[in-house]
Amino acid sequence: MSQISLRTITKSFGETPVLNNVSLDIEEGEFVTLVGPSGCGKSTFLRILAGLEAADAGQVEIQGRDVTAIRPADRNLAMVFQSYALYPHLSVAQNIMTPLRMRDLNRLGRLPVIGPLLSRAAHRKMRDQVGEVAETLQITPLLDRKPGQLSGGQRQRVALGRAMVRQPVAFLMDEPLSNLDAALRVHMRAELSELHRRLQATFVYVTHDQAEALTMSDRMAVMMHGDILQVGPPNDIYRNPASLDVARFIGSPRINTLPGEVNGTGGLELLGVTTETRVRGLRQAVTMGVRPEHLHMRVTGRFSGTVRHRENLGSDIFVHLEVAGAPAKVVLRLAPAEAVELGLGTRVAFDFNPTDILLFDATGARLAFTHPAREVA
């Protein structure tokens, strides 16, 4: 049994559909990322899991219990928001302690949890719990500071600490790194992955940043237009996208796409070149996809283009070629030594290994094909 199950979730805002009969199972201890472009429904999906939004139809189960109609406070989930949502007048320790104080407030019939209502033992237990969380997040020296005295990364850790102290069934994170600068996002990605390994807890993470999804997830669910298009380990989705939409969204720079055609004998023709690749099915227009790292310069390559732009990333050079018949520039990922003499206007011949390409039909669905060396699905 999955720890969390969302089944056939449907949601609309007025006349606008947001989620279209979407289902997802999440196992205990998994790091699952919902990734997709803005407006695809991923945050709404997370809010329905948290109980902050009500689905029009469908069911939410946590640890085998139907919680669809249960209020957020009773689902034992902790949410970390993009804005951190820290109390500016409270210290770091008091911010982290807030969920524990609120829990006791509910037990005492919503009376103020101050003074004699909490015993010294209860206060001591809370301080010990806050101390353990602070030590895990390496923010013990910051406990007496106010949020305004912290950096973005430190505030993010405090928000995580406030979630951790509750010891929830799962952590829900809605684009928690989007307010950080690029260098700090990279650092926090590593810290979140390490935290997940230490806690062995369930993380459900929402982002539009594919780099976050690829580097941190055990599994990721690619969402577009209110649908989950594919679920699987990041490397599997990168190498074996189920559709052209997934292939184009996952990967940076994005996958190169070239128009092709399957001729009457099942042969694949690309930009006027007939290849040895054989496609099952009738004559049809197809799209070939090939990642930048799978294109190689050749002295006498079957394809060629003119250098129109270079991106120097230090360890890699991305060379953008204008290729006759291609709808967009073709990008090659090269080592710096390979690209030394490739100035603007240089003519470059290139080719690819047939086993590295992907084929899609006119609807964007993946096509199976064969090559004399091996079969590729």
Image (spheres, rainbow, N blue to C red):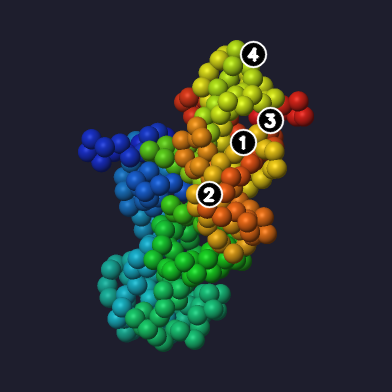
Please name whichever residue, 245 or 338, is drawn nearer the observer in this view of the structure: 338
Instruction: Indicate which disc, 1 or 4, sits on the residue closer to the N terminus.
Output: 4
Q: Position of residue 247 (x, y in %)?
A: 53, 40
Where 54 sits versus 341, above or below? above
> Dot 3 lies on which element?
strand
Please name whichever residue, 346 or 12, is drawn nearer the observer in this view of the structure: 346
Can you tell which of label 1 and label 3 is closer to the viewer? 1
Is 276 on the left-hand or right-hand side of 127? Answer: right
Where 89 sits versus 194, above or below? below
- The Cα atoms of the two marked residues, 1 and 4, are separated by 22 Å
Can you tell which of label 3 and label 4 is closer to the viewer? 4
User: What residue is rendered at 46% in x and 35% in y?
Assistant: 327
Is 140 on the left-hand or right-hand side of 297? Answer: left
Instruction: Indicate which disc, 3 or 4, sits on the residue closer to the N terminus.
Output: 4
> Dot 2 lies on which element?
loop
> Dot 1 lies on which element?
strand
The residue where tag 1 is placed is 303
- Disc sitting over residue 376 in the figure: 3
- The Cα atoms of the two marked residues, 2 and 3, are separated by 36 Å
Q: Are marks 1 and 2 in contact (CB under 8 Å)?
A: no
Instruction: Indicate which disc, 1 or 2, sits on the residue closer to the N terminus.
Output: 1
